[in-house]
Image: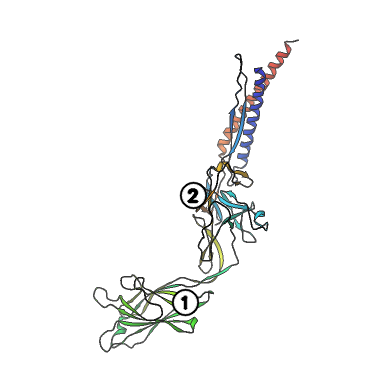
Amino acid sequence: MSISSSLNAGVAGLSANSSRLASISDNIANSSTYGYKRVETDFHSMVISGSGGSYSAGGVRATNQRMISENGPLVSTSNSTDLAVRGRGMLPVATYGDVNSGDGEQQMLLTTTGSFRADKDGYLTSESGLVLLGWPALADGTIPSYPRDTEDGLEPVRLKVNEVTGEPTTMVDISLNLPATDTNASGTGDAHTLSIEYFDNTGTSESLTVEMTPTIPATGDSNEWTMVLRDSASGGAVIGEYTLTFDDSRADGGKLASVATVSGGAYDGVTGTMIVNVDGGPIEIGIGGPGLEGGLSQLSDTFAPISIDKDGFPVGNMLGVDIDANGIVRASFDNGATRTIFQIPLVDLPNPNGLVSLDNQTYRPSTESGSYFMWDAGAGPTGEVVAYAREESATDVANELTTMIRTQRAYSSNAKVIQTVDEMLQETTNIKR
Protein backbone atom coordinates (compact mmCIF):
# COMPACT_ATOMS: atom_id res chain seq x y z
CA MET A 1 0.00 0.00 0.00
CA SER A 2 1.54 3.34 -1.11
CA ILE A 3 0.41 5.14 2.06
CA SER A 4 2.58 2.79 4.13
CA SER A 5 5.55 3.49 1.84
CA SER A 6 4.99 7.20 2.47
CA LEU A 7 5.44 6.56 6.18
CA ASN A 8 8.67 4.63 5.53
CA ALA A 9 9.95 7.41 3.27
CA GLY A 10 9.26 9.99 5.96
CA VAL A 11 11.14 7.96 8.56
CA ALA A 12 14.05 7.54 6.13
CA GLY A 13 14.04 11.30 5.56
CA LEU A 14 14.25 11.95 9.29
CA SER A 15 17.16 9.54 9.62
CA ALA A 16 19.02 11.02 6.63
CA ASN A 17 18.63 14.60 7.82
CA SER A 18 19.65 13.57 11.33
CA SER A 19 22.86 12.18 9.84
CA ARG A 20 23.48 15.44 7.94
CA LEU A 21 22.85 17.48 11.09
CA ALA A 22 25.40 15.32 12.93
CA SER A 23 28.07 16.05 10.32
CA ILE A 24 27.20 19.77 10.36
CA SER A 25 27.49 19.79 14.16
CA ASP A 26 30.89 18.10 13.98
CA ASN A 27 32.12 20.55 11.33
CA ILE A 28 31.02 23.61 13.30
CA ALA A 29 32.40 22.22 16.57
CA ASN A 30 35.82 21.80 14.86
CA SER A 31 35.81 25.12 13.02
CA SER A 32 38.79 26.19 15.17
CA THR A 33 40.59 22.83 15.13
CA TYR A 34 43.90 23.03 13.27
CA GLY A 35 44.03 20.62 10.34
CA TYR A 36 40.41 19.51 10.64
CA LYS A 37 38.88 18.12 7.43
CA ARG A 38 35.16 18.66 7.13
CA VAL A 39 32.64 15.83 6.66
CA GLU A 40 30.24 16.03 3.73
CA THR A 41 26.87 14.20 3.83
CA ASP A 42 25.20 13.24 0.54
CA PHE A 43 21.67 11.92 -0.01
CA HIS A 44 20.81 9.09 -2.42
CA SER A 45 17.30 8.16 -3.49
CA MET A 46 15.95 4.62 -3.12
CA VAL A 47 13.41 3.70 -5.82
CA ILE A 48 10.86 0.87 -5.46
CA SER A 49 8.87 0.09 -8.62
CA GLY A 50 5.09 0.21 -8.35
CA SER A 51 2.46 -1.86 -10.17
CA GLY A 52 -1.06 -1.25 -11.52
CA GLY A 53 -0.54 2.50 -11.65
CA SER A 54 0.31 2.82 -7.93
CA TYR A 55 3.56 4.31 -6.69
CA SER A 56 5.54 3.12 -3.68
CA ALA A 57 8.01 5.57 -2.13
CA GLY A 58 11.50 4.15 -1.74
CA GLY A 59 12.83 6.84 0.55
CA VAL A 60 16.40 8.14 0.91
CA ARG A 61 19.70 7.11 2.45
CA ALA A 62 22.67 9.20 3.55
CA THR A 63 26.39 8.62 3.08
CA ASN A 64 29.21 10.54 4.81
CA GLN A 65 32.69 11.27 3.47
CA ARG A 66 35.54 13.18 5.07
CA MET A 67 37.07 15.57 2.51
CA ILE A 68 40.72 14.93 3.36
CA SER A 69 41.91 16.33 0.02
CA GLU A 70 40.58 19.81 0.91
CA ASN A 71 43.10 22.14 2.54
CA GLY A 72 42.37 24.89 5.02
CA PRO A 73 44.12 28.29 4.98
CA LEU A 74 47.59 28.63 6.53
CA VAL A 75 48.23 30.91 9.50
CA SER A 76 51.64 32.13 10.71
CA THR A 77 53.09 31.22 14.10
CA SER A 78 56.27 32.00 16.06
CA ASN A 79 57.52 28.42 16.43
CA SER A 80 60.04 27.18 13.86
CA THR A 81 58.76 23.61 14.17
CA ASP A 82 55.10 24.44 13.60
CA LEU A 83 54.58 22.76 10.23
CA ALA A 84 51.95 22.76 7.51
CA VAL A 85 51.81 21.52 3.93
CA ARG A 86 51.16 23.99 1.12
CA GLY A 87 49.65 21.91 -1.66
CA ARG A 88 49.45 18.16 -2.07
CA GLY A 89 51.07 15.69 0.32
CA MET A 90 50.99 14.77 4.01
CA LEU A 91 53.49 14.67 6.88
CA PRO A 92 54.45 11.25 8.33
CA VAL A 93 53.91 10.94 12.10
CA ALA A 94 53.55 8.25 14.75
CA THR A 95 51.92 8.18 18.16
CA TYR A 96 54.13 8.90 21.17
CA GLY A 97 53.22 5.58 22.78
CA ASP A 98 54.16 3.70 19.63
CA VAL A 99 57.56 5.44 19.43
CA ASN A 100 58.32 4.68 23.09
CA SER A 101 57.07 1.09 23.02
CA GLY A 102 60.65 -0.17 23.04
CA ASP A 103 60.39 -2.41 19.97
CA GLY A 104 62.08 0.12 17.68
CA GLU A 105 59.14 0.15 15.28
CA GLN A 106 56.24 2.51 14.81
CA GLN A 107 53.20 2.61 12.56
CA MET A 108 53.22 5.52 10.16
CA LEU A 109 50.21 7.82 10.31
CA LEU A 110 49.61 10.91 8.20
CA THR A 111 48.63 14.49 8.98
CA THR A 112 48.76 17.83 7.20
CA THR A 113 49.83 20.07 10.08
CA GLY A 114 51.23 19.97 13.60
CA SER A 115 52.84 22.04 16.33
CA PHE A 116 55.94 20.06 17.19
CA ARG A 117 58.31 20.78 20.08
CA ALA A 118 61.15 18.79 21.59
CA ASP A 119 60.09 16.65 24.55
CA LYS A 120 62.32 15.50 27.41
CA ASP A 121 63.98 12.95 25.11
CA GLY A 122 64.41 15.41 22.22
CA TYR A 123 61.64 13.98 20.03
CA LEU A 124 59.65 16.55 18.07
CA THR A 125 56.22 15.89 19.56
CA SER A 126 52.87 17.68 19.31
CA GLU A 127 50.55 18.40 22.22
CA SER A 128 48.27 15.62 21.00
CA GLY A 129 51.09 13.07 21.28
CA LEU A 130 52.18 12.82 17.63
CA VAL A 131 55.89 12.39 16.89
CA LEU A 132 57.25 13.72 13.59
CA LEU A 133 59.00 11.14 11.37
CA GLY A 134 61.79 11.68 8.86
CA TRP A 135 64.89 10.26 7.20
CA PRO A 136 68.07 10.67 9.30
CA ALA A 137 71.12 12.26 7.68
CA LEU A 138 74.62 10.83 7.73
CA ALA A 139 77.40 12.43 9.79
CA ASP A 140 78.44 14.58 6.82
CA GLY A 141 74.89 15.96 6.41
CA THR A 142 73.93 13.99 3.31
CA ILE A 143 70.66 12.07 3.08
CA PRO A 144 71.14 8.45 1.94
CA SER A 145 68.82 6.77 -0.53
CA TYR A 146 65.86 5.41 1.44
CA PRO A 147 62.94 3.32 0.12
CA ARG A 148 60.08 5.53 -1.04
CA ASP A 149 57.19 3.07 -0.92
CA THR A 150 57.66 1.81 2.62
CA GLU A 151 58.07 3.36 6.05
CA ASP A 152 61.14 1.25 6.89
CA GLY A 153 63.61 4.15 6.59
CA LEU A 154 61.62 6.59 8.72
CA GLU A 155 62.75 7.42 12.24
CA PRO A 156 61.40 9.81 14.90
CA VAL A 157 62.93 13.27 14.40
CA ARG A 158 65.08 13.73 17.49
CA LEU A 159 67.01 16.83 18.52
CA LYS A 160 70.06 16.31 20.68
CA VAL A 161 69.69 19.64 22.44
CA ASN A 162 72.70 19.00 24.69
CA GLU A 163 74.90 18.04 21.74
CA VAL A 164 78.14 19.91 21.11
CA THR A 165 79.78 19.82 17.72
CA GLY A 166 82.78 21.12 15.83
CA GLU A 167 83.71 21.13 12.19
CA PRO A 168 87.31 20.82 11.01
CA THR A 169 88.76 23.28 8.54
CA THR A 170 89.29 21.78 5.09
CA MET A 171 89.84 24.87 2.91
CA VAL A 172 91.35 28.35 3.23
CA ASP A 173 91.25 31.04 0.51
CA ILE A 174 93.85 33.77 0.96
CA SER A 175 93.52 37.20 -0.62
CA LEU A 176 96.35 39.68 0.12
CA ASN A 177 98.62 42.21 -1.53
CA LEU A 178 102.42 42.01 -1.44
CA PRO A 179 104.51 45.19 -1.80
CA ALA A 180 106.20 45.23 -5.20
CA THR A 181 108.93 47.56 -3.83
CA ASP A 182 110.19 44.80 -1.52
CA THR A 183 111.54 42.80 -4.49
CA ASN A 184 113.77 45.70 -5.60
CA ALA A 185 117.56 45.43 -5.32
CA SER A 186 117.38 48.04 -2.55
CA GLY A 187 114.91 45.96 -0.49
CA THR A 188 115.66 44.69 3.01
CA GLY A 189 114.50 41.12 2.36
CA ASP A 190 112.36 41.10 5.51
CA ALA A 191 109.58 38.52 5.54
CA HIS A 192 105.88 39.34 5.99
CA THR A 193 103.97 36.96 8.21
CA LEU A 194 100.25 36.17 8.30
CA SER A 195 98.69 33.87 10.91
CA ILE A 196 95.45 32.08 10.00
CA GLU A 197 93.36 30.26 12.59
CA TYR A 198 91.96 26.85 11.67
CA PHE A 199 90.15 24.11 13.59
CA ASP A 200 91.36 20.55 13.83
CA ASN A 201 89.30 17.35 13.94
CA THR A 202 88.43 17.85 17.62
CA GLY A 203 87.39 21.49 17.23
CA THR A 204 90.65 22.78 18.78
CA SER A 205 91.97 26.09 17.48
CA GLU A 206 95.31 25.86 15.65
CA SER A 207 97.15 28.28 13.41
CA LEU A 208 98.56 28.16 9.91
CA THR A 209 101.44 30.61 9.51
CA VAL A 210 102.14 32.05 6.05
CA GLU A 211 105.63 33.56 5.61
CA MET A 212 106.19 35.66 2.48
CA THR A 213 109.89 36.41 1.84
CA PRO A 214 110.95 38.58 -1.16
CA THR A 215 113.81 37.58 -3.43
CA ILE A 216 116.35 40.43 -3.58
CA PRO A 217 118.14 40.67 -6.96
CA ALA A 218 121.53 42.21 -7.63
CA THR A 219 119.89 44.86 -9.79
CA GLY A 220 116.34 45.82 -10.76
CA ASP A 221 113.25 43.97 -9.52
CA SER A 222 112.84 40.21 -9.10
CA ASN A 223 109.01 40.18 -8.68
CA GLU A 224 109.57 36.89 -6.86
CA TRP A 225 108.55 35.67 -3.42
CA THR A 226 109.02 32.51 -1.39
CA MET A 227 105.89 31.39 0.44
CA VAL A 228 106.42 29.05 3.41
CA LEU A 229 103.51 27.45 5.27
CA ARG A 230 103.93 26.29 8.89
CA ASP A 231 101.52 24.32 11.10
CA SER A 232 101.29 25.04 14.84
CA ALA A 233 99.80 21.59 15.49
CA SER A 234 102.98 20.08 14.03
CA GLY A 235 105.26 22.17 16.24
CA GLY A 236 105.72 24.87 13.61
CA ALA A 237 107.02 22.44 11.01
CA VAL A 238 107.08 23.50 7.36
CA ILE A 239 104.22 21.81 5.48
CA GLY A 240 104.69 23.58 2.14
CA GLU A 241 107.09 25.87 0.29
CA TYR A 242 106.44 27.63 -3.03
CA THR A 243 108.14 30.14 -5.28
CA LEU A 244 105.75 32.83 -6.55
CA THR A 245 106.46 34.99 -9.57
CA PHE A 246 104.36 38.09 -10.37
CA ASP A 247 103.77 39.82 -13.69
CA ASP A 248 105.04 43.38 -14.17
CA SER A 249 103.74 43.95 -17.71
CA ARG A 250 101.46 46.87 -18.58
CA ALA A 251 98.49 44.56 -19.21
CA ASP A 252 98.80 42.24 -16.20
CA GLY A 253 101.02 44.11 -13.77
CA GLY A 254 100.70 42.86 -10.20
CA LYS A 255 99.00 39.58 -11.08
CA LEU A 256 100.34 36.17 -10.10
CA ALA A 257 102.13 34.76 -13.13
CA SER A 258 103.43 31.38 -11.98
CA VAL A 259 103.93 29.15 -8.93
CA ALA A 260 106.71 26.61 -8.54
CA THR A 261 106.36 23.88 -5.89
CA VAL A 262 109.42 23.37 -3.70
CA SER A 263 107.76 21.08 -1.14
CA GLY A 264 104.26 20.14 -0.01
CA GLY A 265 101.26 19.54 -2.25
CA ALA A 266 101.56 20.46 -5.91
CA TYR A 267 100.06 23.76 -7.06
CA ASP A 268 97.07 23.43 -9.44
CA GLY A 269 97.06 26.32 -11.90
CA VAL A 270 93.49 25.60 -13.02
CA THR A 271 91.97 26.08 -9.57
CA GLY A 272 94.69 28.23 -8.05
CA THR A 273 95.05 25.89 -5.06
CA MET A 274 97.42 23.47 -3.41
CA ILE A 275 96.68 20.80 -0.78
CA VAL A 276 98.92 20.68 2.28
CA ASN A 277 98.79 18.28 5.19
CA VAL A 278 98.45 19.70 8.68
CA ASP A 279 98.61 17.44 11.72
CA GLY A 280 94.91 16.51 11.43
CA GLY A 281 94.72 15.96 7.68
CA PRO A 282 94.67 17.80 4.34
CA ILE A 283 93.68 21.46 3.89
CA GLU A 284 93.20 23.09 0.51
CA ILE A 285 94.90 26.48 0.26
CA GLY A 286 93.69 28.91 -2.42
CA ILE A 287 96.01 31.69 -3.57
CA GLY A 288 94.63 32.41 -7.05
CA GLY A 289 96.58 32.33 -10.27
CA PRO A 290 96.71 33.42 -13.91
CA GLY A 291 93.22 34.24 -15.18
CA LEU A 292 91.60 33.73 -11.76
CA GLU A 293 89.85 36.31 -9.60
CA GLY A 294 91.12 37.17 -6.12
CA GLY A 295 94.10 35.50 -4.50
CA LEU A 296 97.53 37.10 -4.21
CA SER A 297 98.65 40.31 -5.89
CA GLN A 298 101.83 42.43 -5.92
CA LEU A 299 101.14 46.14 -6.13
CA SER A 300 102.62 49.32 -4.71
CA ASP A 301 104.45 49.29 -1.38
CA THR A 302 102.00 47.94 1.19
CA PHE A 303 101.53 44.51 2.68
CA ALA A 304 97.73 44.30 2.97
CA PRO A 305 95.75 41.18 3.90
CA ILE A 306 92.42 41.66 2.10
CA SER A 307 90.31 38.68 3.12
CA ILE A 308 90.58 35.18 4.53
CA ASP A 309 87.76 32.78 3.66
CA LYS A 310 87.68 29.39 5.33
CA ASP A 311 85.32 26.68 6.54
CA GLY A 312 85.30 24.89 9.88
CA PHE A 313 83.98 25.86 13.29
CA PRO A 314 85.04 25.47 16.94
CA VAL A 315 83.02 23.38 19.36
CA GLY A 316 79.51 24.80 19.87
CA ASN A 317 76.17 24.02 21.48
CA MET A 318 72.91 23.47 19.61
CA LEU A 319 70.63 26.50 19.60
CA GLY A 320 67.66 25.20 17.60
CA VAL A 321 66.49 23.90 14.26
CA ASP A 322 65.03 25.28 11.05
CA ILE A 323 63.03 23.38 8.44
CA ASP A 324 63.04 24.59 4.84
CA ALA A 325 60.47 24.19 2.07
CA ASN A 326 62.09 20.91 0.95
CA GLY A 327 61.68 19.36 4.40
CA ILE A 328 65.38 19.59 5.29
CA VAL A 329 65.88 19.87 9.05
CA ARG A 330 69.03 21.84 9.92
CA ALA A 331 70.40 22.26 13.42
CA SER A 332 72.16 25.55 14.22
CA PHE A 333 74.92 25.97 16.81
CA ASP A 334 76.23 28.96 18.73
CA ASN A 335 79.55 28.74 16.90
CA GLY A 336 77.79 29.63 13.63
CA ALA A 337 77.75 26.09 12.27
CA THR A 338 74.70 24.46 10.73
CA ARG A 339 74.19 20.75 10.12
CA THR A 340 71.55 18.78 8.23
CA ILE A 341 70.14 16.16 10.60
CA PHE A 342 66.88 14.95 8.98
CA GLN A 343 64.70 15.21 5.90
CA ILE A 344 60.93 15.12 6.20
CA PRO A 345 59.29 13.59 3.10
CA LEU A 346 55.76 14.29 1.92
CA VAL A 347 53.55 11.24 1.48
CA ASP A 348 51.22 11.22 -1.54
CA LEU A 349 48.39 8.81 -2.35
CA PRO A 350 46.09 8.44 -5.39
CA ASN A 351 42.93 8.89 -3.28
CA PRO A 352 43.49 10.87 -0.04
CA ASN A 353 39.75 10.76 0.68
CA GLY A 354 40.03 6.98 0.99
CA LEU A 355 42.29 7.22 4.06
CA VAL A 356 41.02 5.87 7.36
CA SER A 357 40.27 8.79 9.71
CA LEU A 358 41.66 8.56 13.25
CA ASP A 359 41.83 10.89 16.26
CA ASN A 360 43.83 14.14 16.31
CA GLN A 361 43.54 14.79 12.56
CA THR A 362 45.58 11.72 11.65
CA TYR A 363 44.92 9.22 8.89
CA ARG A 364 46.01 5.70 8.01
CA PRO A 365 46.53 4.37 4.46
CA SER A 366 43.95 1.82 3.28
CA THR A 367 43.13 -0.17 0.17
CA GLU A 368 40.71 2.62 -0.84
CA SER A 369 43.41 5.29 -0.62
CA GLY A 370 45.83 3.34 -2.82
CA SER A 371 49.57 2.77 -2.46
CA TYR A 372 51.55 5.69 -1.09
CA PHE A 373 54.85 7.17 -2.27
CA MET A 374 57.24 9.40 -0.36
CA TRP A 375 58.44 12.44 -2.30
CA ASP A 376 60.99 15.10 -1.53
CA ALA A 377 58.89 18.14 -0.62
CA GLY A 378 58.55 20.43 -3.63
CA ALA A 379 59.22 17.59 -6.09
CA GLY A 380 56.79 15.59 -8.18
CA PRO A 381 53.11 16.25 -7.44
CA THR A 382 53.68 17.33 -3.85
CA GLY A 383 53.72 20.84 -2.42
CA GLU A 384 56.07 22.42 0.11
CA VAL A 385 56.67 22.12 3.81
CA VAL A 386 55.93 25.45 5.49
CA ALA A 387 57.57 26.18 8.85
CA TYR A 388 56.26 28.77 11.30
CA ALA A 389 52.73 27.90 10.08
CA ARG A 390 49.65 25.86 10.92
CA GLU A 391 46.77 24.79 8.70
CA GLU A 392 43.41 26.02 9.93
CA SER A 393 40.17 24.04 9.78
CA ALA A 394 38.67 23.47 6.33
CA THR A 395 35.20 24.26 7.74
CA ASP A 396 33.33 27.22 6.22
CA VAL A 397 31.06 28.19 9.13
CA ALA A 398 28.78 30.39 7.02
CA ASN A 399 28.17 27.56 4.55
CA GLU A 400 27.57 25.08 7.39
CA LEU A 401 24.99 27.38 9.01
CA THR A 402 23.18 27.74 5.68
CA THR A 403 23.14 23.98 5.24
CA MET A 404 21.90 23.56 8.80
CA ILE A 405 18.87 25.78 8.11
CA ARG A 406 18.05 23.78 5.00
CA THR A 407 18.45 20.53 6.96
CA GLN A 408 16.16 21.79 9.70
CA ARG A 409 13.46 22.67 7.15
CA ALA A 410 13.83 19.29 5.45
CA TYR A 411 13.61 17.51 8.80
CA SER A 412 10.43 19.42 9.70
CA SER A 413 8.95 18.59 6.30
CA ASN A 414 9.61 14.89 6.76
CA ALA A 415 8.05 15.06 10.22
CA LYS A 416 5.01 16.69 8.62
CA VAL A 417 4.79 13.80 6.13
CA ILE A 418 4.72 11.31 9.02
CA GLN A 419 2.07 13.39 10.80
CA THR A 420 -0.05 13.54 7.64
CA VAL A 421 0.25 9.79 7.03
CA ASP A 422 -0.75 9.18 10.62
CA GLU A 423 -3.86 11.32 10.16
CA MET A 424 -4.72 9.51 6.92
CA LEU A 425 -4.35 6.12 8.58
CA GLN A 426 -6.58 7.35 11.39
CA GLU A 427 -9.23 8.32 8.85
CA THR A 428 -8.94 4.86 7.26
CA THR A 429 -9.46 3.26 10.65
CA ASN A 430 -12.52 5.42 11.29
CA ILE A 431 -14.22 4.13 8.11
CA LYS A 432 -14.96 0.84 9.88
CA ARG A 433 -16.81 2.56 12.72
What is the number of the mark on residue 383? 2
Tell me the element at label 1. strand
Nearer-the-camera pick, 400 or 96: 96
Residue 106 found in image quarter: bottom right
Spot occupied by residue 121 in the image (x, y as percentages of width and height): 64, 61
**Residue positioned most to the right:** 433
Residue 354 found in image quarter: top right
Residue holding disc 1: 197
Cα separation between marks 1 and 2:
43 Å
Q: Is residue 394 visible?
A: no
Spot occupied by residue 278 in the image (x, y as percentages of width and height): 47, 78
Categorize mark 2 by other alpha carbons within 10 Å: few (<14), some (14-19), many (20+): many
Q: Is residue 60 left or right of residue 263?
A: right
Categorize mark 1 by other alpha carbons within 10 Å: few (<14), some (14-19), many (20+): some
Residue 163 found in image quarter: bottom right
Q: Does the residue at mark 1 contact the one at mark 2 (Cβ under 8 Å)? A: no
Which residue is at a point 32% across and 84% down the rendered structure image? Answer: 182
Nearer-the-camera pick, 68 or 408: 68
